[in-house]
Image (tube, grey):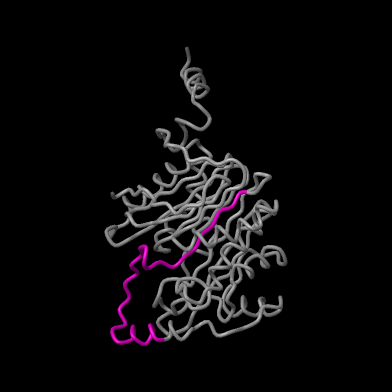
Amino acid sequence: MKRRDILKIASLSLPAWGISQSLFGKVLPAPRKSAKGPVVISTWNHGLMANDEAWKVLEKKGNALDAAEKGVMIVENDPENQTVGIGGFPDRDGIVTLDACVMSKDGCGAVAFLQDIKNPVAVARKVMEETPHVMIVGEGAKQFALAQGFKPENLLTEKTAKDYKEWLKTSEYKPVINIENHDTIGLLAMDHNGDISGACTTSGAAWKMHGRVGDSPIIGAGLFVDNEIGGACATGLGETVIRSAGSAMVVELMRHGYEPAEACKEVLKRIVKNEKDIANIQVGFLALRKDGTYGAYSIHKGFTYAVKTLELSKLLDSPAVNS
């Protein structure tokens, strides 16, 4: 028997969503977390309120993109949350700058380095639907938002301004990312039709250099959706996620047979291998597959994610590579 015939027979014997042999090698199947009907998963503790808001859309048989947008917007609108939207930590010049993106079966849109507009995710959707572009940044993004009817407002709240003044005493930049200190909400939603959409929004790393942009608005890094396969989103140190093309790689691994959690884990293993100061770097991924199976993984313990389905609404602790 010729070698190619042996390989053909072997490939046909592999289950579609179990052990796979592909360009990415082999992986043992992970325990499945599956849901029938609509599913929403999102990052961190504030994912609970985001999921509840997204569910208001899905329970009325609304679409996944509307659910994803509305879900993260409630976090953007919370001035007590200092990692997203209004009240987000400023850069080292004391200016709040926001990044966001959306992606669905119909396309994607993003804004970066946006100032004075508290709902960058809504502006990102407008970029997708009203322009031939994918990303608009800086002053151009603000001008576009104003032209679309968004109202400017001061994003630096009294609480955050006080924290900024305290930071100025040392002016130390240490991008620690954990359950108490993070800078993103990423959300993936699957609607009654089985369509998947995602949204990611952030105020970026606290005390960053003016003009810095992380992974959150970058398609393929902070968020990626392939409606034939599933979606993934990221949280953590943006530079690390960008260097790994993290979310796109998670989805591609699912395409080649990896379970969602195992796909997240595999990309994180590569990050651990390639990054130098891994003890001080946290990254977490969420993944949602077309059949309703979902999963998460992070480098270190401490990454939480929220899940809402017809059967449950719960905050979960992600498994970690370095546990």
Q: Residue at x 33, y 83 (%)?
A: 167
Is 184 colored magenta in this rendering?
Answer: yes
Residue 319 is situated, as x and y percent measured from the top left of the image, at 36, 48
Q: In the rendered view, does 202 fall on the left or right side of 25?
A: right
| 274 or 295, nearer to the observer | 295
| 1 or 90, nearer to the observer | 90
Is 271 colored magenta in this rendering?
Answer: no
Q: Residue at x 44, y 60 (%)?
A: 44
Q: Is residue 298 above or below residue 181?
A: above
Residue 175 is situated, as x and y percent measured from the top left of the image, at 35, 69
Q: In the rendered view, does 111 fall on the left or right side of 23?
A: right
Q: Magenta stretch?
A: 162-190
Q: In the rendered view, does 312 fall on the left or right side of 169?
A: right
Q: Residue at x 53, y 82 (%)?
A: 155
Q: Is residue 116 above or below residue 129?
A: below
Residue 78 is situated, as x and y percent measured from the top left of the image, at 52, 73
Residue 184 is situated, as x and y percent measured from the top left of the image, at 47, 65
Q: In the rendered view, does 153 fall on the left or right side of 301?
A: right
| 232 or 57, nearer to the observer | 57
Q: Count of labels shown?
A: 0
Q: Is residue 157 above or below residue 268?
A: below
